[in-house]
Amino acid sequence: MVIGMIVDNEFTGDPRVNNEATLLVNEGHKVKVLCFTFGTQPIYEKINGIEVFRIPIRKSIKNAAFALVNTIPFYHWFWQIHIERFIKQQGIERIHAHDLYMALSAGKAAKRFGIKLIVDLHENYPEAILNYKWANSFPKRLVVKPHKWKKNEERFLRYAHKIITLSPSFANELTSRYPYLEQSMLVVYPNVPNLDELLSYPITPNIFPKNDKFILFYFGGISERRGIYTCIDALKIALKKHPNIHLLLIGPVDGPEIERFNKEISAPEVENSITHYPWKDISLLPSYIAISDICLSPIEKNKQHEAGIANKVFQYLLFEKPIVVSNCKPQADVVQQGQCGLVFESNNEQSLANCILDLYSNPNKRAEMGAKGKELVLNEYNLSRFRCVLTGLYS
């Protein structure tokens, strides 16, 4: 089968997209990806059997067009034209659109050619956009209209023949919200890792000057909604008992929060106990996890984050580290199921500090949790284990 994947970003920007495409190619399907390029990548490229077709565009233009989509739907028109051309020229037999906001243009194009549409929901987008500062600040919210996405969701999902969600709870929420969605239309595919890829990366022992530091590690986007300031406040509490605790952060800071973030990490109590790198290649992630003592997923508990589990949780666990997570149900359930970490109350720095101090004082507990976490990923939460979800969907 010739599967056309639609991604409104660069192909290499999301491991979920790459993992799914790789799995389907390995199952004998032809996978062709239509995506953007914001730099100097070639218009066409074949990567591990996946054919990638790129639309060159400036990122600033893309962002502006997307922000205006609820006022002037140029973005939908743009994508529908390109998807229709893609279907016709590449002989696409199924469309696999990533993220809710691609469902309308992909759905209209698929309908015109009489082919079926799979919508892959990476998150609960109507809830997510209500937490994005760029979309809700005045006067941008008057143009972006973030509250309109709840109505969009109902309309856009009508084009889908199948819907992929991150968790059973999110799938159940959608079917209860929209009676036209039958349970058989939805499948659950979490953000599970590709073990072969991650385990192939070499470990660099001296990638970070650990010395006598006890390292708390966070990898991913940095913002208030991801719980970063709760981590910094918890660090202040923990440092009073153990001055060698160090917070290592890797990831880009949300634009509207750069000033606040820089101020927070420059505070006298923590300025020598925090290291931040805006970006590191994914191939270096195992090395940074290896030198860490505890890994963190402190996201705020809300409807957006209750939709599924971030990639980082499974990546941390694979490399045998205990994790401390906020009480968002999907990630808390995994931690409690595998007995591989501790759960703290979202936005509660004292609760987080208590978990950190507990694990600091119990190296055997850390080792035991780390071993159980690795076992959980190897046995339950990986690409091979969920292979049947996608293969069954397409068969």
Image: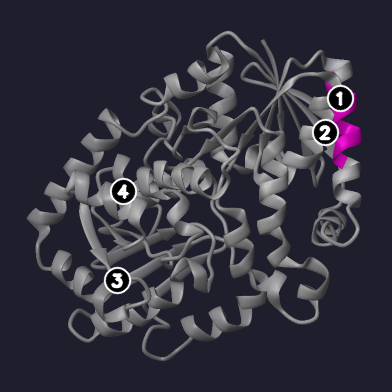
Q: What residue does disc 2 label?
A: 108
Name, please, the residue furthest toward the front. Answer: 179
Amino acid type, residue under disc 1 in the picture:
Arg
Front one among 14 and 284: 14
Of marks 2 and 3, which one's residue comes earlier in the chain?
Answer: 2
Q: What residue does disc 4 label?
A: 290
Of marks 3 and 1, which one's residue comes earlier in the chain?
Answer: 1
Amino acid type, residue under disc 3 in the picture:
Glu
For label 1, the crowd category at 10 Å Cα-Cα, with few meaning under 14, some 14 to 19 and many 20 or more, is: few
Cα gap from disc 4 to disc 2, whole angstroms: 47 Å
Q: Secondary structure at mark 4?
A: helix
Q: Which is more foreground, mark 3 or mark 1?
A: 1
Residue 71: quadrant of the picture:
bottom right
Q: Which is more foreground, mark 2 or mark 3?
A: 2
Amino acid type, residue under disc 2 in the picture:
Lys
Q: What residue does disc 3 label?
A: 345
* Image disc number at residue 212: none
Q: Position of residue 72 (x, y in %)?
A: 91, 58
Q: Which is more foreground, mark 4 or mark 2?
A: 2
* Image disc number at residue 112: 1
Q: Secondary structure at mark 3?
A: loop
Residue bounds of the magenta highlight: 79-87
Drawn side of residue 380 relative to residue 62, left or right: left
Quadrant (top left, top right, bottom left, bottom right) of the C terminus: top right
Q: Residue at x 19, y 79 (%)?
A: 242
Establish if 269 lies above or below 124. below
Q: Position of residue 153 (x, y in %)?
A: 67, 50
Of marks 3 and 4, which one's residue comes earlier in the chain?
Answer: 4
Of marks 4 and 2, which one's residue comes earlier in the chain?
Answer: 2
Establish if 177 lies above or below 115. below
Q: Secondary structure at mark 1?
A: helix
Q: What secondary structure is the stretch in magenta mostly built from?
A: helix
